[in-house]
Image: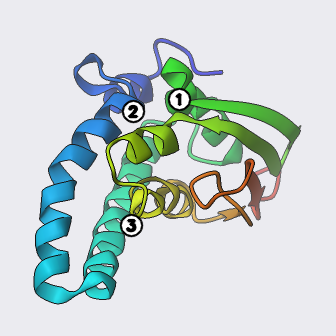
Amino acid sequence: MQRPDDPAAGRAKSNGLSLLARRKIEAAIVAPIYEEMRAALGEAAARDILRKAVRRAAIASGAEMAGCAAGGADLESFKAILPLWTEDEALTIEVIGDRPGVFDFNVTRCRYAETYRAMGLGDIGDILSCSRDGAFCEGYDPRIELKRTQTIMGGATHCDFRYRSSAKPSE
């Protein structure tokens, strides 16, 4: 799906680290900060601050990746970067639908969720990982919408990713 010469590949895999490895490092840094915020402000406020920060970072990451998309950012180029999230067997996916304007898949194994739980961060794993997905789309191409009704992090057997684009085929 993604070409090795795609500039987005180099940016997303900075310092030779997969996204899963980067998320684990980020979580280790965020965990004590979150605990301090929680102690000082309460859990609800700490979660809200963390959610806003992760959302802002995901939108910025999406915009950066969009700037590297050969031929422009749209759902088709978005599909091509999926290997960045699945690298190192981070996600096991089953594609349900892949046609212009539609990309549907289920995640049947999520090592992001497994990693956060193993680190004792299962209670904020949804913020650290799942909440990034829709926000990333906003930065990448606001015409892409993600609908998801369940996640492995939330206790479901699979995550149901349903992407739609409002872009016309000629755009």
Q: Nearer the viewer, residue 75 or 70?
A: 75
State yes or no: discs 2 and 3 in contact (Cβ < 8 Å): no
Are there few (<14), some (14-19), or many (20+) residues within 10 Å of tag 3?
A: many
User: Number of numbered discs present?
Assistant: 3
Give the residue number, with chain letter if any, for mark 3. Answer: 55
Give the residue number, with chain letter if any, for mark 1. Answer: 90
Where does the image place residue 127, in percent across and percent down from the top left?
42, 63
Cα separation between marks 1 and 3: 21 Å
Give the residue number, with chain letter if any, for mark 2. Answer: 19
Please state if 170 lies on the left or on the right of 115 as rendered. Answer: right
- Asked which secondary structure carries label 2, the reply is helix
- Kindly identify the amino acid type of the residue bearing the numbered disc 2: Leu
Please state if 64 lies on the left or on the right of 85 as rendered. Answer: left
State yes or no: discs 1 and 2 in contact (Cβ < 8 Å): yes
Cα separation between marks 1 and 2: 8 Å
The N terminus appears in which quarter of the rendering?
Answer: top right
- Asked which secondary structure carries label 1, the reply is loop
Q: In the drawing, what numbered circle is on residue 46?
A: none
Where, by quadrant of the figure, is residue 60 drawn? bottom left
Are there few (<14), some (14-19), or many (20+) residues within 10 Å of tag 1?
A: many
